[in-house]
Image (tube, rainbow, N blue to C red):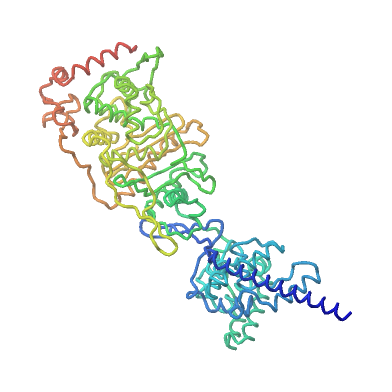
């Protein structure tokens, strides 16, 4: 009997030995695995900050949460002390697990058959906060233990504490002590008093119950308990404890009010651009702790938003979009994609496609100047029916059916926005020419090669249109708009820096300059004809020379114009494409444009477009179209490619001879053939 018991004990001892050995081997393997896996990433989300061109903060992107990472050396001793004493008094003594607390918690959980009792150390809480959900299951606790060991093996205690105090949740979307301090007290956590630090330390156990904004009575009771604990542990002096108990806490107004962002439509585009540049998602950009230095002119943006509020009545449902670009670089200086971002985040600068009307004509007239036209090229302005190649009859009409009923010059056609002149020119050049020219100006979508394209019947975006005008402003060089100059990561290391680019010359510099001078005519009353020039309603508001063109359709109003230093585009209309019927509403686009452009140039000297070699300026008599002399009537300076300017003088009154000398035979024959297909 004794022998059998001995054998049984020996067998049990052998099994225990082997189990112990296996356990040791498994533990060793686990430790090796944890070592080989390396440190888990302690890379929580952080706020991304956006700066204006003058390095002023214009917005803070928080992703789904509000975070600010602070290194351990800059964390408040008060916050550290209150947190460690409350959450894990033996933090610096254990290796991730407080065995005494765990044993007590296990006994309670087994006796109640639940997992309600916790004994998590700071390291365990950090593991849960960073890598796991907060569900109370055995599976999650095993994973938590695994990550806890990894953290303890690869990080120092200070690094773990730093991670914890930057990731713990304090409620109201605030993660980390710095974010919480800013949220509740509007101050850095380094400046917190003992009472404020104790209040914050007590919140993470249950933000719903212990946030002073949710339940001030519970929060104050827990704060007082923490202060007493700190005093009993000799972490505070008697005097500090007395003052802390008596301190009345004041909470920041920002804790209950929303922060009004600057240029929200612009910021949306910045995030999209940053995501493309760094090949990340927008959410990764928002919460990656980046510093994004943008092109925004904060003052011009404020003036743009102010103009929208001032000019368009609050009760109007009319929408508007404004974009200002630096033509030499493509830098976006101001952008408003709508009147109220909170009502609609739809960005009408980039995403809305609308018919530009006559604001599309400059691209037609660039092609015309490239194909033999001069500012004095005359075509008939009268009601006309055009027979198209497919036999269809097309009859464009002028605004309010006003016509000169006589030949007008290209300069007049632009200033008065004559539609018959435009369609006649488009058919002379061939509609495919305008499509190809538009492509040169950066319009990426293939436009329809039809007669009506001359009148802007194909939908485009304000961004496309303003960028195209920017090419005229910069002398014909390629132009791509952008919003970001530099991006730095959370360690202030530059991850993107925009380098100065040499922009390719796309357009002919001479033709571009001549067209720019012609586009100044929409503000010049000297070019008044059968009706006032199209910019006459705002010309008195302008203090310098600008080039530009307006555009009108039944549902849209546009004004795009520029100086050498800035191009601004404005669109107004209804989102549902209903017609604009109120006369006042048809004027808003021009008024907005004038206000923005005048502010942009306020206090600056007049800048001029540089005249290219091979272009000559000639004073032209407005009545005869010949060179002006002091004895002639009203005259205007016009520009020509050298050799195409008039040779005679107004006193000679030799208009028929002059036209005969200047009209190219081939051009005349083509016009004659075109007229055969017209019916009055």
In this picture, residue 147 sits left or right of residue 261: right
Write the residue at 77% across / 70% down: 109
Image quadrant occupied by the C terminus: top left
* Mark count: 0
Image quadrant where residue 563 sits: top left
| Residue occupying the far front of the picture | 3
- Nearer to us in this view, 297 or 70: 70
Write the residue at 31% across / 37% down: 548
Residue 658 in the image: state x and y as whole percent: 14, 20
- Nearer to us in this view, 54 or 396: 54
In this picture, residue 100 sits left or right of residue 385: right
Residue 157 in the image: state x and y as whole percent: 55, 75
In this picture, residue 181 sits left or right of residue 18: left
- Nearer to us in this view, 56 or 340: 56
| Residue occupying the far bottom of the picture | 238
Image quadrant occupied by the N terminus: bottom right
- Nearer to us in this view, 222 or 30: 30
Write the residue at 35% across / 48% down: 331
Above/below status of 19 relative to 557: below
* One can see residue 185 in this view: no
| Residue occupying the far right of the picture | 1
Residue 248 in the image: state x and y as whole percent: 60, 76
In this picture, residue 184 sits left or right of residue 621: right
Above/below status of 96 relative to 139: below
* One can see residue 113 in this view: yes
Residue 409 in the image: state x and y as whole percent: 24, 25
């Amino acid at each position: 009997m004794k022998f059998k018991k001995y054998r049984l004990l020996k067998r049990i001892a052998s099994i225990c030995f082997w189990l112990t050995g296996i356990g040791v081997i498994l533990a060793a393997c686990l430790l090796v695995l944890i070592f080989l896996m390396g440190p888990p990433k302690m890379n929580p989300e952080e706020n991304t900050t956006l700066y204006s061109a003058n390095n002023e903060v214009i917005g803070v992107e928080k992703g789904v949460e509000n975070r600010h990472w602070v290194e351990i050396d800059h964390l408040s001793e008060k916050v550290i002390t209150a947190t460690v004493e409350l959450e894990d008094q033996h933090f610096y003594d254990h290796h991730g697990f407080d065995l005494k607390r765990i044993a007590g918690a296990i006994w309670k959980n087994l006796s109640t058959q639940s997992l309600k009792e916790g004994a998590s150390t700071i390291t365990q809480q950090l593991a849960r906060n960073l890598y796991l959900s907060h569900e109370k299951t055995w599976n999650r606790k095993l994973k938590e233990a695994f990550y806890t060991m990894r953290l303890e093996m690869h990080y120092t205690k200070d690094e773990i504490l730093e991670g914890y105090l930057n990731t713990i949740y304090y409620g109201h979307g605030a993660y980390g002590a710095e974010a919480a301090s800013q949220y509740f007290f509007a101050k850095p956590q380094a400046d917190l008093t003992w009472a404020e630090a104790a209040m914050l330390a007590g919140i993470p156990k249950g933000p719903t119950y212990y946030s002073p904004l949710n339940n001030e009575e519970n929060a104050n009771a827990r704060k007082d308990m923490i202060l007493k604990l700190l005093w009993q542990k000799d972490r505070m002096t008697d005097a500090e404890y007395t003052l802390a108990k008596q301190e009345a806490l004041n909470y920041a107004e920002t804790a209950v009010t929303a922060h009004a962002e600057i240029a929200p439509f612009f910021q949306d585009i910045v995030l999209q651009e940053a995501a493309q540049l760094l090949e990340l998602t927008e959410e990764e950009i928002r919460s990656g702790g980046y510093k994004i230095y943008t092109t925004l002119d904060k003052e011009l943006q404020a003036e743009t938003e102010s103009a929208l509020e001032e000019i368009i009545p609050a009760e109007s449902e009319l929408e508007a979009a404004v974009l200002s670009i630096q033509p030499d670089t493509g830098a976006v200086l101001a952008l408003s994609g709508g009147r109220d971002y909170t009502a609609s985040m739809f960005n009408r600068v980039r995403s809305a496609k609308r018919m530009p009307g006559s604001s599309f004509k400059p691209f037609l007239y660039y092609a015309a100047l490239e194909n033999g036209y001069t500012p004095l090229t005359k075509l008939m302005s009268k009601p006309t029916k055009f027979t198209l190649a497919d036999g269809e009859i097309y009859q464009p009409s002028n605004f309010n059916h006003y016509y000169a009923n006589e030949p007008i010059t290209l300069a007049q056609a632009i200033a008065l926005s004559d539609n018959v002149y435009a369609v006649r020119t488009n058919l002379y050049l061939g509609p495919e020419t305008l499509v190809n020219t538009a492509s040169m100006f950066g319009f990426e979508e293939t436009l329809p090669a039809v007669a009506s394209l001359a009148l802007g019947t194909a939908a485009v975006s304000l961004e496309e249109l303003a960028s195209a005008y920017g090419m005229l402003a910069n002398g014909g060089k390629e132009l791509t708009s952008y919003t970001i100059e530099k991006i730095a990561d959370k360690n202030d290391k530059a991850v993107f820096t925009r380098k100065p680019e040499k922009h390719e010359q796309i357009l002919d510099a001479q033709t571009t300059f001549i067209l720019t001078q012609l586009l100044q005519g929409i503000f010049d009353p000297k070019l008044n004809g059968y009706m006032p020039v199209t910019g006459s309603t705002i010309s008195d508001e302008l203090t310098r020379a600008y080039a530009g063109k307006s555009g009108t359709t039944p549902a849209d109003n546009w004004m795009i114009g520029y100086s050498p230093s800035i191009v601004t585009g404005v669109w107004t209309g209804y989102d549902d494409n209903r017609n604009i019927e109120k006369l006042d509403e048809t004027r808003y686009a021009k008024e907005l444009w004038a206000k923005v452009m005048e502010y942009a140039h306020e206090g600056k000297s007049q800048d001029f477009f540089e005249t290219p070699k091979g272009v000559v300026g000639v004073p032209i008599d407005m009545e005869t179209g010949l060179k002006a002399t002091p004895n002639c009537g009203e005259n205007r300076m016009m520009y020509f490619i050298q050799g195409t300017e008039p040779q005679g003088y107004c006193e000679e009154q030799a208009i028929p001879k002059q036209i005969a000398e200047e009209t190219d035979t081939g051009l005349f024959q083509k016009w004659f053939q075109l007229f055969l297909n017209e019916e009055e």
